[in-house]
Image: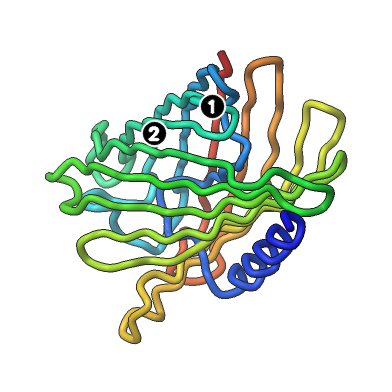
Amino acid sequence: MTRVVGHLLFTGLLALSVGLSDARADHLYLHSPYDVEQGKLEATYFLDAILNTPIATFGPLPREGLLLHTASLSYGLTDRWSIEGFMDFVEPTRGGKNQFTYVDSKFHTLYRVLDREGYLPAVGLLVGYTVPRRQFTHSDRLEVQLLTESRTERWMIRLNPTVIADAQNTKFGYEAGLYGFWRQTVRLGLESFSNIGPLRPSQQGLVQHSVGPAVQFEWGRISWDLGIQFGLNNFSDDVAIKSIIDFHF
C-alpha cells in the first residue's frame, strides 16, 4: 500500500511541476524530507546575490546588486519531525542605499510522511509562517510545501511544489533539482526555480523561471552549497548566485 501511495504522489507531483513554479523569490534552496536528526541542532547561513535583473525593486529597495542574508536554526524533535526558525536581512549595494535591513522572521515545521522505498520517493510536508517587518512588507505569509526526494547511490531528484498565501493573493510554484554524487563529499546538480504567481488572468504574464548548476561540498559536520541561476524570461533575475553553509551539531 505504501508503494502505491508513494508512486501516485510522485507521479502527481511530476505532472504538477510542469505547470507550477517556485513562489519564493528570496532563496534558491530545495528542502529535503530528511531534515535534521532527532535531538540534533543545525545552524545555516544563506547568502543570495542578485547580480543582474530587469526587476526594479525588492520591497522599497533596489533589487539589482541586492544581497539577501538569512540565519536559521533547526532542531529535530523526533526522527520525522523538526522545527526551524529564520531571521532575514537584505543589503542593497547599488542605488546609493548601502544599508543592512531586517526584513522578517520565519518559522517552519517539517514532517516526513513517507520514507524512501527503492526508487519511490520520500515525502514530507513543510508548513511555514512569516512575520514581516511592517515598514518593509505589510502582510504575514503562510507557506506550504510538499517535499519529495528519490535517491540512489549515484543520483537524487527533489521536487518541492509550493503554495504561498498572504493578504493580497495566493501564489503557486515549485523548486526542482537533479543531482549526481561524485565521491562521498561532492554533489553536482542542476536546479530550477520558477513562479507562476497568482492565478489571475490579469497577472498570468508574471511568470518567473530560472535554471542553473549547483555543487555541494561536505567536510564532516559542515556542508557548503554553491549555485548560480540564469533567468529564462524578462520577469526573472538575469543572474543570481547562492551560498548556503550548514553546521551540524
Residue 28 location (% of width, % of height): 52, 47
Quarter of the image with the C terminus is: top right
Identity of the residue drawn at 48% across and 22% down: 43
Between 221 and 109, the one lying in front of the other is: 109
The count of marks equals: 2
Q: Residues within 10 Å of mark 2 (few under 14, many from 20)?
A: many
Quarter of the image with the N terminus is: bottom right
* Residue that mark 2 sits on: 69
Disc 2 to disc 1, how far (Cα)?
Answer: 29 Å
Vertical arrangement, residue 77 with respect to residue 164, above or below: above
First in residue order: circle 2 vs circle 1: 2
Q: Nearer the viewer, mark 2 or mark 1?
A: 1
Q: Is residue 155 left or right of residue 99?
A: right
Residue 172 location (% of width, % of height): 43, 66
Vertical arrangement, residue 64 with respect to residue 101, above or below: below
* Residue that mark 1 sits on: 78
Residue 179 location (% of width, % of height): 75, 47
Vertical arrangement, residue 170 with respect to residue 225, above or below: below
Identity of the residue drawn at 64% across and 25% down: 223
Residue 9 location (% of width, % of height): 65, 63
Q: Amino acid at mark 1?
A: Thr
Identity of the residue drawn at 54% across and 44% down: 29
Q: Regarding mark 1 in the picture, which secondary structure is present there? A: loop
Extreme residue in the bottom direction: 201
Q: Quadrant of residue 54?
A: bottom left
Q: Regarding mark 2 in the picture, which secondary structure is present there? A: strand
Q: Is residue 24 left or right of residue 141?
A: right
Between 222 and 9, the one lying in front of the other is: 9
Q: Amino acid at mark 2?
A: His
Q: Which mark is residue 167?
A: none
